[in-house]
Image: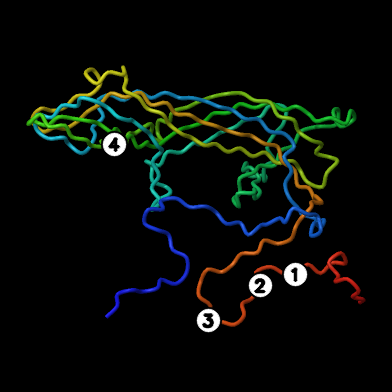
């Protein structure tokens, strides 16, 4: 009896922890298949990028697992930090989140008559853009944009995950290695960590367009961590009876935010056609339906074909 079995289709080896993406786009290096295509998109009219930093000091943070009776840490190999996120609950208050709040001067957000901002769909697929209005007449006459100013308050809430790779000796003086882990609270929704900055953006004409310009903002956050005084003796405490580890930390919250003024436009772009992906599932059906229609404008007529 043979135990050899053929596994159909592509497989990911157990040693392959990472992967590469497949887009379905290809270009043969020549222009023979390049055609013009119109697309209806959002154009970035002006943008501003900000890097902000917040600090949080942590005293006596408990780490797990406990190292055991009589343990003592003799070296730290690495200490690292990442933001906490619970994929089972996007509303988990422990999720590290950045919430920007912006007020404008020289312009105003368009409202619906009930005091609510008018939100439109952004490229992220959510209602993440606000319509902006300002009297742009003066700069329109010069063919230039109108400056607007704003104040940004960024509220940081949630927790981070801190891991410490340590070398420790147990009560028999044997060297061991362990990874200590803790979910460290940064701030609560009731008392967020606030970062503030100011910005200027350029607004296009609100009159020479069928659409009002839109304002959008988004942020990303990362963290870096170190021992409070960079000393194992001063910053790490171990209960001699249980081996429970406590540590004093300094956590830096590193925030990148971008603000954009965008307007809907129609562009002509050069294209090599639709992406073509190869199915990686064994086929039983003889044919399969298309996902996108064929191009049927005049430029796509086969050579010599007459209508």
Q: Which residue is mark 2?
A: 290
Choose between 242 and 77: the one closer to the eye.
77
Q: Which residue is mark 1?
A: 294
**Residue occupying the point 74% across, 30% down:** 202
Q: Secondary structure at mark 2?
A: loop
Q: Quadrant of residue 216?
A: top right
Choose between 137 and 248: the one closer to the eye.
248
**Residue occupying the point 85% across, 71% down:** 302
Q: Is residue 305 left or right of residue 250?
A: right
Q: Quadrant of residue 109?
A: top right
- Disc 3 and disc 2 in contact, CB within 8 angstroms: no
Mark nearer the viewer, 1 or 4: 1
Mark nearer the viewer, 3 or 2: 3
Mark nearer the viewer, 1 or 3: 3
CA gap, disc 4 to disc 3? Answer: 50 Å
- Disc 2 and disc 4 in contact, CB within 8 angstroms: no
Mark nearer the viewer, 4 or 3: 3
**Residue occupying the point 45% across, 50% down:** 18
Counting every numbered tag in the picture gives: 4
CA gap, disc 3 to disc 2? Answer: 17 Å
Density class for disc 3 (Cα within 10 Å; few <14, some 14-19, many ≥20) is few
- Disc 1 and disc 2 in contact, CB within 8 angstroms: yes
Q: Which residue is mark 3?
A: 284
Choose between 286 and 6: the one closer to the eye.
6
- Percent position (x, y) of residue 53? 49, 25
| Precedes in sequence: disc 2 or disc 4 | 4
Q: Which residue is mark 4?
A: 182
The residue at the far front in this view is 2
Q: Quadrant of residue 234?
A: top left
């Amino acid at each position: 009896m043979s135990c050899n079995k053929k596994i159909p289709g592509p497989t990911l080896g157990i040693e392959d922890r990472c992967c590469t993406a497949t887009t379905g786009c290809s270009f043969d290096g020549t222009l023979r298949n390049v055609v013009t295509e119109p697309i209806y998109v959002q154009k970035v009219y002006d943008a501003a990028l900000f890097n902000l930093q917040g600090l949080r000091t942590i005293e006596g943070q408990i780490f797990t697992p406990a190292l055991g009776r009589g343990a003592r840490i003799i070296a730290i190999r690495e200490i690292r930090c990442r933001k906490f996120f619970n994929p089972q609950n996007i509303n988990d208050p422990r999720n590290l989140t950045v919430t920007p709040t912006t007020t404008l001067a020289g312009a105003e957000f368009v409202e619906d008559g009930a005091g609510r901002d008018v939100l439109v769909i952004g490229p992220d697929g959510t209602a993440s853009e606000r319509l902006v209005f300002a009297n742009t007449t003066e700069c329109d006459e010069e063919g230039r944009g109108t400056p607007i100013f704003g104040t940004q308050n960024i509220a940081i809430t949630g927790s981070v995950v801190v891991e410490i790779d340590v070398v420790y000796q147990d009560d028999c003086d044997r060297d061991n290695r362990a990874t200590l882990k803790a979910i460290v609270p940064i701030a609560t929704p009731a008392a967020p960590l606030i970062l503030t900055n100011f910005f200027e953006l350029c607004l296009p004409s609100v009159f020479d367009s069928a659409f009002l310009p839109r304002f959008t903002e988004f942020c990303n956050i990362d963290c870096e961590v170190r021992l409070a005084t960079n000393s194992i003796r001063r910053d790490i405490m171990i209960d001699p009876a249980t081996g429970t580890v406590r540590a004093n930390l300094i956590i830096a919250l590193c925030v990148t935010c971008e603000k954009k003024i965008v307007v809907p436009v129609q562009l002509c772009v050069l294209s090599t056609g639709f992406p073509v992906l190869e199915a990686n599932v064994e086929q039983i059906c003889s044919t399969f339906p298309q996902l996108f229609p064929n191009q049927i404008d005049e430029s796509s007529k086969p050579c010599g074909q007459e209508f």
